[in-house]
Image: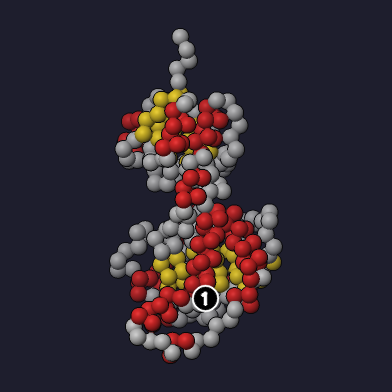
């Protein structure tokens, strides 16, 4: 008798091509939903579990899969996977750390420019019948601005390269975890200096208990009244209520957010009424290129199942 094929559970929608590649190596079950009980009922004899963005792979799920050999997440982060539980079982967790990096950097730059040049404001003014009066608002060219990067990640590095190549922008950066860039030209400064000197502050911190609401009322209060804040990374990093209060009080000049500490953003949230605030629905990485790239995690899952070393394995 031949070897029993690998049993692979895909808990969230994946591309047809990725599923086809997986089926070349085993029996693939694609779940109709990613509820915990649905996953638990499917992984009892699974060799591999693949998720995308919503499913939480908890210790309970991992413990319910005694034969599990690999977990794959089609995402640049592994926030929703219990790495400690996986590590106790010596189960590799593979992911796509570089997926959507260019897409997110482009979108972050777009928000910066739209906010700095008040594109949304002028659009509304023009539609409301204002023309000449709305143009009497002086603004500096972006090459004369200082962009501060709070946290170092691949998107921050890509964004800095775009800013320097396109505008020659001065870049400051600070990482509380002592992260160091590999290809980024920036001046490292302390947090207080970063907050005080940045014309535009872009958030790129990793998700951790100590970074939740990192930009709280006190730190927002250290920014200049003419400074702008942009967050396309993780919503939990910014206290959205405190930010809304700062915008209403004009203690900072504006903000652009693609992610929120509560998603979807409640209809009654004060950010929705805040002045000079651009809100987008978590779409920074939503490009066809990023969508295709994220499913390359299937190939790392196959590598682990067939005894090869994966390209991208998460570590504690």
- Residue 51 or residue 288, whichever sits in front: 288
Q: Is residue 6 visible?
A: yes
Q: Residue at x 52, y 81 (%)?
A: 225
Q: Looking at this view, is 236 or 110 the one in front?
A: 110
Q: Quadrant of the C terminus?
A: top right
In the depicted structure, whether residue 189 falls above or below residue 1: below
- Residue, x 50% and y 50% (percent of image)? 289
Q: In the current view of this chain or complex, which residue is farthest to the top?
A: 1
Residue 135 place in picture, x, y as percent:
47, 86
Q: Quadrant of residue 141?
A: bottom right
In the image, is residue 227 above or below residue 86?
below
Q: In the image, 266: left or right of 27?
A: left
Percent across and percent down for residue 152 are 61, 58
For the residue pair 140 and 44, the one nearer the viewer reads as: 140
- Residue name at image x 47 percent, y 53 percent: 287
The x, y position of residue 51, in whole percent, is: 43, 40
Residue 131 appears left or right of 184: left
Q: Residues within 10 Å of mark 1 (few under 14, many from 20)?
A: many
- Relative to 85, does residue 158 appear above or below in the rendering? below
Q: How is this picture coloured?
A: secondary structure
Q: Is residue 215 visible?
A: no
Under tag 1, what secondary structure? Answer: helix
Q: Which residue is mark 1?
A: 116
Q: Nearer the viewer, residue 208 or 198?
A: 198
Left/right placement of residue 268 relative to residue 160 reads left
* Horizontal and vertical percent position of residue 206: 54, 54
Number of numbered callouts drawn: 1
| Residue drawn 46% across the image and 50% down it | 288
């Amino acid at each position: 008798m031949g070897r029993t094929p690998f049993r692979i559970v895909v808990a969230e929608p994946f591309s047809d091509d990725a599923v086809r590649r997986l089926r070349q190596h085993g029996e693939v079950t694609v779940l109709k939903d990613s509820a915990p009980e649905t996953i638990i009922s499917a992984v009892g004899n699974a060799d591999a579990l693949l998720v995308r963005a919503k499913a939480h792979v908890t210790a309970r799920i991992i413990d319910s899969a005694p034969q599990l050999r690999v977990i794959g997440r089609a995402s640049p982060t592994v926030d929703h996977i219990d790495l400690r539980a996986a590590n106790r079982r010596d189960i590799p967790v593979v992911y796509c750390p570089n997926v959507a990096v260019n897409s997110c950097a482009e979108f972050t730059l777009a928000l910066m420019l739209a906010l700095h040049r008040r594109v949304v404001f002028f659009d509304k003014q023009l539609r409301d019948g204002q023309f000449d009066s709305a143009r009497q608002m002086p603004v500096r060219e972006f090459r004369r601005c200082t962009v501060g990067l709070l946290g170092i990640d691949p998107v921050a590095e890509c964004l800095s390269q775009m800013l320097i190549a396109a505008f020659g922008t001065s870049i400051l950066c600070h990482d509380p975890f002592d992260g160091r860039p590999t290809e980024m030209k920036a001046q490292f400064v302390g947090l207080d200096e970063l907050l005080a000197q940045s014309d535009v502050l872009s958030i790129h911190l990793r998700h951790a208990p100590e970074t939740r609401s990192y930009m709280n009322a006190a730190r927002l209060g250290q920014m200049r009244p003419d400074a702008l804040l942009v967050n396309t990374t993780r919503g939990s990093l910014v206290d959205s209520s405190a930010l809304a209060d700062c915008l209403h009080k004009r203690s900072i000049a504006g903000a652009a957010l693609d992610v929120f500490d509560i998603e979807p953003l409640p209809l009654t949230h004060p950010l929705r009424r805040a002045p000079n605030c651009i809100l987008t629905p978590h779409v920074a990485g939503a490009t066809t290129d990023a969508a295709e790239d994220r499913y390359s995690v299937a190939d790392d899952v196959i590598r682990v199942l067939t005894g090869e070393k994966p390209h991208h394995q998460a570590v504690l």
